[in-house]
Image (cartoon, rainbow, N blue to C red):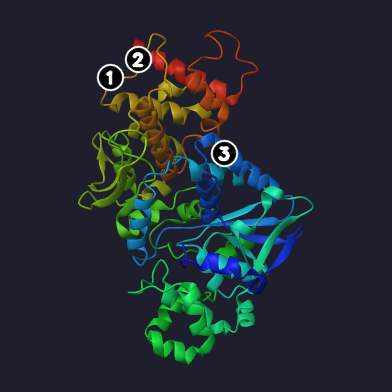
Amino acid sequence: MGVPRLKKFIKENSEYLSRDLTLNLPNTIIIDGTNVLYEIYHKKGLQNDSENLEKLHDFVSTIKKYVKPIFIFDGGHANDQKFPTMIERRKNTLQKKECIFLSDNWIKILKELDEIQIARCDFEADHEIAKIASAYECPVLSGDSDFYLMDLKHGFILYDDFKWEEAKNGIKCKLYHREFWEKMGVKEECVPYLAAFAGNDIIKPQKPGKVEDIVPFLKKNSLDEVLKYVGAKLKPLISSCYSLPETSLVVEYLRTPDNRPISQLSSHFPDWFIELYRKCEVGKYVVDVVLHKRRFLGHNVGYTDTSLRLRQMQYGILINDSKSTITEYQPYVALGDMASELKEKNVKPITQLQLRNIPNLKMITGMDLEHRKDLFYCFLEIEQSVCEDKIDLFHLPIAALAFWWRNNQFTPVQSKERKISKNHKHEFSQWMAILKHTIYLNQLLKFPITKCDVTVITSKVFSKLFEENKKQRSQGENSAGLSEQEELYNALELFIDQLYQS
């Protein structure tokens, strides 16, 4: 993300280009939520959801002691400029272990804390983040080197230089300003043109140069001379990459969160949906599906794809055209745990189910709760009565388990004790994928079912129950004192028993 080798150059010249700073309240900081999640997860080499959950909790609980954080998240893509880079990046990360609920956990943790503001941008967040930082007169925190080339009046902090794990009486960091380049003899207005020579996610020079070789050229030349060299046609592209927008719709939302959000997506989605989208309560994938008819899946598909019908029903709601085709980019696993290739697959929306037309988002706007709840259970192929005697919080994961049971192409996992277990990796990953897309269907139907708390399912306690494959208490015993994780696990085990007996 950003300009190759720029981070390394800044670090090697930090005495010129940054200064030491200790952050303390009432300092505000704008956090690139999408990127910082990547930095925490991938750079720490976390192996599973429970480790990831703990690290995210640690990060948020630590920083809020010393700063007022505002988390801003990417939306979908406005155009295809970065599409080739996105494909290449996905291919390069296929061999990295992914946690299927990584971003869901991140959002859930942040939303649990009332004092933390979060928002999703209509499209990619970089320019909005820069404008929000300008409006709040505070620095930006990210691991994306593109921010080095933006005119951030109150500075930029690279995630690697943000020493939150060592915080004591404040968070030590290094604050960068673009104007500091003047100390090295480079005119500030020339700094964004590093990308013209070195490249970024959009600009791809035929022969990319190294930052350390480009800087001496920029020192010797004015902006006019630089433009003569790279071509004046590149100026609008550099400006589109690194200039701040005049206004920010997200700034208005942050200042007046109770008002109806204004959005560039208003012609594509109803008001209630845009409100959920801005609050990060629906996934950003919806924009790519509606605007570009494509989707990158964040989980492995493998040789069976039991969540396919759920995705087709999502497309039925979002596109509502049986003749359309959605191009999915699917991480594919042939053997083992890691994806081996990125497959491209054309998927048709399902627009009719059991002689009923699947409604679009505008139709869902006027539907009452019972109608939407009826649709949910119809989509999941389960009778509503199956969940009636269960705790509301468990309805969604049980419905997802029932869908998996009915659509599993293999013999259901069986053992003497009739358990579901992480030892059966393929079946477990199938259920997790189905659970994720069941959550997405619930979002598109305006939450007729109680939201599923993914932090419960990805917690260390719940994970340990699966690994040990052991009920906490036999049926009929008093469940008082059991944790939420234990109660959910027991409810799932009981439901499996019922399915075997039916």
Residue 126 placement (x, y as % from top left):
51, 65
Residue lying furthest right: 169
Residue ID for mark 2 = 414
Q: Tag 3's secondary structure? A: helix
Verify CB contact (< 8 Å) between mark 1 and mark 2.
yes
Q: Which mark sits nearer the N-terminus, 3 or 2?
A: 3
SS assignment at label 2: loop
Q: Is residue 358 visible?
A: no
Q: CA distance from mark 1 to mark 3?
A: 33 Å
Percent across and percent down for residue 488 are: 52, 23
* Distance in Å between CA atoms under marks 3 and 2: 30 Å
Q: Nearer the viewer, residue 69 or 226?
A: 226
- What residue lies at 56% left-to-right and 43% top-to-bottom? 108
Is 117 on the left or on the right of 468, as rendered?
right
In three-dimensional space, the C-alpha distance between marks 1 and 2, rounded to whole angstroms, equals 8 Å
Where 502 falls versus 129 (above or below)?
A: above
Residue 411: mark in rendering: 1
Q: Crowding at label 1, few (<14), some or many (≥20) Cα neighbours within 10 Å? A: few
In the rendered structure, which amino acid carries the disc numbered 1? Thr
Instruction: Check whether the beta carbons of the residues at disc 3 and disc 2 lie within 8 A of each other.
Output: no
Q: In terms of sequence position, does the residue under pointer 1 or pointer 3 come before the other?
A: 3
Q: Position of residue 155 (x, y in %)?
A: 64, 70
User: What amino acid type is highlighted by mark number 3?
Assistant: Leu
Q: Which residue is mark 3?
A: 53
Along the horizontal axis of the image, is 320 left or right of 108? left
